[in-house]
Structure formats: structure tokens, C-alpha cells
Amino acid sequence: MLIRRIEKFMRVHEMPATKFGRLAANDPRFVLDLRMGRVPRASTEARIRRWMTEYEAALRPAPAPAPQQFSTSEMKELSHAF
């Protein structure tokens, strides 16, 4: 259910219901209405789920770049540069 996922999301991110509603649905009463039994359209539910996924992805640190591998000939060239 969407409301369970939203409640968990808000708990993890320490976000009040009104802030979540404003950011995710442009409706500060969105979560409060869900708690009272509101059933969102399928497109609204999909949009909210996508917003939560994107929000969490934006918080993850970027992966570190892989160390560069040099061939033996490149290593010889580099050693002469210093």
C-alpha cells in the first residue's frame, strides 16, 4: 500500500507529513487525506513512488571513479615526466 511506503519514507527521512505532501504532490494535505482513506489515482500513485525513488537517489553519494590502469609503456613515459 502507498500509505505504508510513505509512512516509512517519512520516518526514515524525518519528514513531516505536510512537507512530504508539498514536495511530492504539491498538496500539504496529501498524506493526511491518505490516512483518512483517500485513494489516489494510479497515475498519482506512480508519480509519488517515482518522486520517492528520485529523492532517495539524489541523497546517495556518487560512486568513486575506478582507479586508472596504465600499460607498461605508459608507466615508463610517466616515470620520465617526473
Image (cartoon, rainbow, N blue to C red):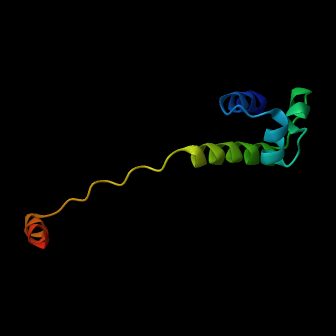
Percent of width and height locating residue 52: 68, 42
Quadrant for the N terminus, please.
Answer: top right
Give the mark count: 0
Residue placed at 8% from the left, 71% from the top?
80
**What residue do we see at 47% from left, 50% from top?**
62
* Percent of width and height locating residue 15: 74, 34
Tell which residue pokes out farthest to the front in this image.
82
> 9 and 14: which one is in front?
14
Task: Tell which of 42 and 64 is nearer to you.
Answer: 64
The location of residue 63, given as percent across then percent down, is: 42, 49
Look at 88% across and 45% down and name the residue there.
27
Residue at 91% x, 33% y: name it.
33
Q: Is residue 22 above or below residue 71?
A: above
Position of residue 51 measured from the top left corner of the image (x, y, whole percent): 70, 47
In the visual, does 74 lie left or right of 68? Answer: left
- In the rendered structure, the answer to whether residue 65 lies left or right of residue 20 reads left
Q: Is residue 7 above or below residue 67?
A: above
**66 with respect to 36 (left or right):** left
Q: Nearer the viewer, residue 61 or 31?
A: 61
Camera-nearest residue between 63 and 76: 76
Q: Quadrant of the C terminus?
A: bottom left
